[in-house]
Image (cartoon, grey):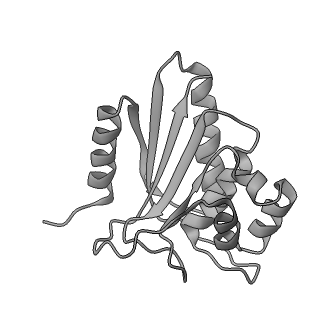
Amino acid sequence: MCATNRQALQAAAVEAARLGYEAEILTDCLSGEARKMAVELCNTALERQKTLAGNKLCLLAGGETTVTIKGDGKGGRNQEMALAANICLAQTRGICALFAGTDGSDGPTDAAGGFAFAHGVEKMGGLTNAGNFLDENNSNKALALAGELLVTGPTRTNVMDMAILLVEAL
């Protein structure tokens, strides 16, 4: 039997529930421009955060996005999503995210993806620098500066990519 992205998302939802999160799978057909999809997912998390009453929420999405290369930087679609999410969430609290390739790789790098944490943009040198990294498709360097690269090595499986956003009430 072959695993699917939906099964991976369902397993993540079970684990999130075990850890005390209300888990919701948003989609297993995520597609489109990576940076735009990251902003959409972050905006969904921000909207949902407004209605949380002491609960913790785990939003899950899977699929494969694309990157339109305009710069000469280094990264992959999951790293680009993580960088865009860092920018989107820079002025917020209570939301963090992970964007990762289930095969343990993302673009021509040794990373599987990256994280978005509250102070990541500061570690990248501020919003202007983070935006410049994004414009140059240089997400790998930006996330390395912030200590937000996910490096797993090969997993020997591939059921597309996963986005995991953890949301806490303010």
User: Nearest the camera: 110 or 55?
Assistant: 110
Q: Splitting the image into 4 quarters, where does residue 93 fall?
A: top right
Image spot of residue 115 (x, y percent): 56, 55
Q: Quadrant of residue 136?
A: bottom right
Task: Point out the residue furthest to the left here.
Answer: 1
The answer to whether residue 150 is above or below residue 44 is below
Image quadrant holding the N terminus, namely bottom left
Q: From this viewpoint, is residue 142 visible?
A: yes
Number of dots carrying numbers: 0
In screen coordinates, is 166 left or right of 74? Answer: left
Q: In the displayed structure, does residue 105 sit left or right of residue 65? A: left
- In the drawing, does residue 28 fall left or right of residue 129? left
Residue 42's spot in the image, x, y percent?
62, 43
- Residue sitting at 53 percent across and 15 percent down? 53
Of residues 63 and 119, the one nearer the viewer is: 119
Location of residue 7 with respect to 101 vertically, above or below: above
Q: With respect to residue 90, does 123 lie above or below?
A: below
Position of the C terminus by quadrant: top right
Residue 82 at what x, y percent from top left? 61, 58
Q: Residue furthest top?
A: 53
Q: Residue at x 55, y 61 (%)?
A: 114
Q: Is residue 33 visible?
A: no
Q: Residue at x 39, y 66 (%)?
A: 160
The residue under the point 51% across, 72% down is 111
Outermost residue toward the right in this view: 128
Q: Quadrant of residue 91?
A: top right
Residue 43 screen position, x and y as percent: 65, 40
